Image (cartoon, helix red, strand yellow):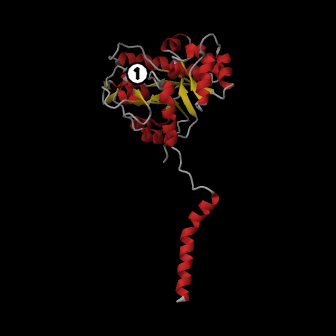
Amino acid sequence: MSKYLSILLVLVIACQSPQKKEAEGGQAAEAEPLFKVPLGVQAYTFRNSFPNGIEATLDSIADLGIVELEGGPLGDYSPEEFRKLCEDRGITIPSTGAVYKELVEDPQAVADKAKGLGASYVMCAWIPHDRGAFNLENARAAVEVFNNAGKVLKDNGITFTYHVHGYEFQPHESGTLMNYLIEETNPEYVSFEMDILWTHFGGGDPVALLKQYGDRWKLLHVKDLRKGTPKDLTGGTSIENDVVLGQGELDIPSILKAANEIGIKHMFIEDESPQPMVQVPQSIAYLKSLTY
């Protein structure tokens, strides 16, 4: 009988030892986070705060633990001066914006501004068109502008990205004009930034598109849409429909998993609501709570 008791005792100790070691170590193994990139925000989120004090707004951003800003120089600050204001607060500027007209008229000036900010990416968020009627002619013109400007930016060490705004999902052949923009632009010169809210709003599937086009996607705007919001192809809805991440229609965990799989390194919270200082901290807490 003592022989069997000895065997049983060995088995019990073997089963319990991993848990015991974890307890002795003071903590169990932590779950792997879903949000793996530096915490970033789109400057437009604080569009109503910056006019009341640029430095104070940057202080508030830093206090939230945000270390990356997508944006450009504000007020009378030069790109270099604005960059220093951010760096003094532990914030870098990986990406900045350019309007379509700037890309047409002087892409070199766009590149110079980006370099002054220390940015590696330039994004354009709007192609001129009649509201709700984006068409093939608009898309063809944009392809030419993006390819030309993208080459200039690449020659300056900058990656150009087009920011999806939802109106591009007009039907075209067997797909949409969004497919056309991605497939007709030169991958050497043109990449893309997915705004997950606008992609969803226009009828696109963020997860499927991330998987379909892989490393053509370089940046992400992370935001959520109020449940039940009517959708269309205008690329616009009430700012009241921007809600705290995880409280809207989008499947944020699945989107983050897909983004991680293709190696996206910069994701910016963008909150267009009238109360970003209420919603952004909640969105940050939500992102930090997500695990695999």
Q: Is residue 14 visible?
A: yes
Residue 235 vertical placement versus 33 (above, below): above
Residue 171 shown left or right of residue 141 in the figure: left
Residue 210 vertical placement versus 91 (above, below): below
- Of the pair 173 and 263, the residue shown nearer to us: 263
Percent across and percent down for residue 233 are 33, 22
Residue type, label 1: Ile
What residue lies at 47% left-to-right and 42% top-to-bottom? 257
Q: Is residue 120 visible?
A: no
Locate residue 15: give its quadrant.
bottom right
Secondary-structure class at tag 1: helix
Residue 261 shown left or right of residue 203 in the figure: right
- Of the pair 204 and 284, the residue shown nearer to us: 284
Percent across and percent down for residue 111 are 60, 18
Return the residue at label 1: 239
Locate residue 14: give its quadrant.
bottom right
Count up the numbered dots. 1
